[in-house]
């Protein structure tokens, strides 16, 4: 987690300076994104909430239906975009960050290898990115996904800001 504190601190400064709020929806990062952001003092000024959306049941509880998922699979750029948009809407935030992927040690049922993740930012600026670590190390991938997600959010905030 220590490697995530510096990018989380930079993101926090940008959010606080602009008075913006953030929602997080993550999957394979397992809560590391939210934990890093909440470790920064003053998080209550910007952090609206976060969810680990790891299963179909969690998607349904988060308001993502089978109809929403038609012609879409998780661990894909369109799903990351949907997840970010839904988090932003449900938590009434200015910005949302989403991550979905396959941490490992094996790939997912869609054929993506371990180390594959899709990231998306929804808000006044939109960004998305696909990450491929090439590693089967679950913990290292979780950290890498969280780090890349925070970097993507920082880019969007700086671009808009």
Image (cartoon, rainbow, N blue to C red):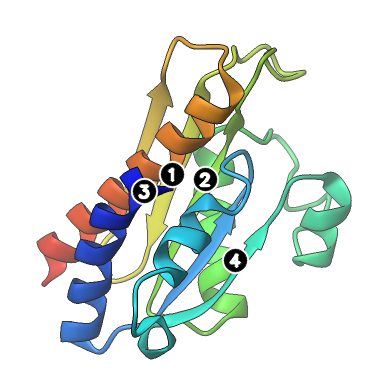
- Please, what secondary structure does the residue beneath circle 1 have? helix
**2 or 3: tag closer to the N-terminus:** 3
In which quadrant is the C terminus drawn?
Answer: bottom left
User: What's the distance in space between the residues labelled 3 and 4, CA to CA?
Assistant: 29 Å
**3 or 4: tag closer to the N-terminus:** 3
Which mark identifies residue 99? 2
Which mark identifies residue 86? 4
- Please, what secondary structure does the residue beneath circle 4 have? helix
Image depth: mark 1 or mark 2 in front: 1
Q: Position of residue 92 (x, y in %)?
A: 52, 85
Q: Which residue is mark 3?
A: 2
Q: Considering only vertical position in the picture, is 122 above or below 47?
A: above
User: What's the distance in space between the residues labelled 3 and 1, CA to CA?
Assistant: 12 Å
**1 or 2: tag closer to the N-terminus:** 2
Marks 1 and 2: CB-CB under 8 Å? yes
Image depth: mark 4 or mark 2 in front: 2
């Amino acid at each position: 987690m220590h490697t995530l504190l510096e990018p989380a601190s930079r993101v926090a400064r940008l959010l606080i300076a602009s008075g913006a709020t953030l929602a997080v929806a993550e999957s394979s990062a397992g809560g590391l994104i939210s934990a890093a952001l909440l470790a920064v003092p003053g998080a209550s000024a910007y952090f609206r909430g976060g969810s680990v959306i790891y299963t179909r049941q969690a998607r349904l509880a988060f308001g993502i239906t089978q109809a929403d998922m038609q012609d879409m699979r998780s661990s894909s750029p369109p799903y990351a975009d949907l997840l970010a948009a839904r988090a932003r809407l449900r938590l009434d935030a200015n910005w949302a960050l989403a991550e979905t992927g396959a941490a490992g040690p094996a790939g997912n049922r869609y054929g993506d290898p371990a180390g594959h993740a899709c990231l998306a930012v929804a808000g006044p600026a939109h960004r998305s990115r696909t990450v491929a670590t090439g590693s089967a190390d679950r913990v290292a991938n979780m950290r890498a996904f969280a780090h890349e997600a925070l970097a993507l959010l920082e880019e969007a905030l700086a671009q808009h800001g």
